[in-house]
Image: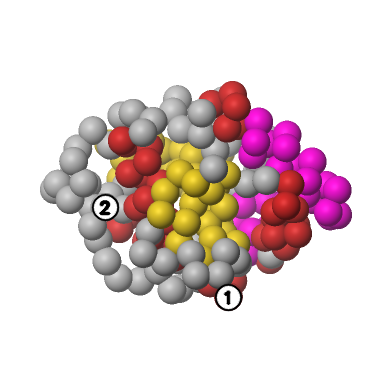
Amino acid sequence: MTIATTARTELRELTADDAPFILDLLNQPSFLRFIGDREVRTLEDSAHRIETRFRASYRENGFGSYAVVLRDTGVPIGICGFVRRESLPMADLGFAFLPQYEGRGYAHEAAVATLGYGRSQLGLPQVMAIAQLDNWRSHRLLARLGFQQMDTRTMPGDAVPVAVFALDLSQPPGSPRSSDDATGHEDT
């Protein structure tokens, strides 16, 4: 199911067919460094993760992380969407892209579409985001999207502190408190 389209991408639900892509993405050095080791080592592990985490989130929460695919080829290049964590009071925006697609504006494009979907279709009044303290690329993207850093904390089960951000989605896109129309360099 497609949840949003942008000029260059489509955001759609992940399926078992995405197992090779998810296996690759979750084992990228940047994913392991900044997001963590999900212990997905085989196609079977990947298919299991898609079903028990991504697809389960669609069923249980009405949202989740979505495949970001190139519109002209259908090739998956990253994920972007909302994650529901017990340790946060609301959904948080998450994103990760294969290294060869970083720095081309895809994460910004997908995040703007995801936030628009959260605002218009899901009725989310506010969303959060987390990023490791030294993940400056994610910090810059979140700032461009209008997120404000609230605090720093260590999430349950993690040893590394993260910056915690929030964004008020009740403001219309492009308003002074929302920068959905921002342009420029992005990254994951």
- Write the residue at 74% across / 42% down: 49
In this rendered view, identify the residue nearer to me: 57 or 177: 57
Q: Secondary structure at mark 1?
A: helix
**Which dot marks residue 169?**
none
What is the crowding at mark 1: few (fewer than 14 residues within 10 Å), some, or many (at least 20)?
A: few
What is the crowding at mark 2: few (fewer than 14 residues within 10 Å), some, or many (at least 20)?
A: many
Q: Work out whether residue 162 can be spotted.
A: no
Residue 42 x, y percent position in the rendering: 86, 54
Classify 79 as above or below 166: below
> Which residue type carries mark 1?
Gln
Residue where numbered disc 2 is placed: 180
Residue where numbered disc 1 is placed: 100
**From which residue to which does the magenta span run?**
30-56
Residue 9 x, y percent position in the rendering: 45, 62
Residue 159 lies within the magenta run? no
Classify 44 as above or below 135: above
The part of the image, by quadrant, that contains residue 121 is top left
Pick whichever of labels 2 and 1 is earlier in the sequence. Answer: 1
The part of the image, by quadrant, that contains residue 28 is bottom right
> Which residue type carries mark 2?
Asp
Residue 54 lies within the magenta run? yes
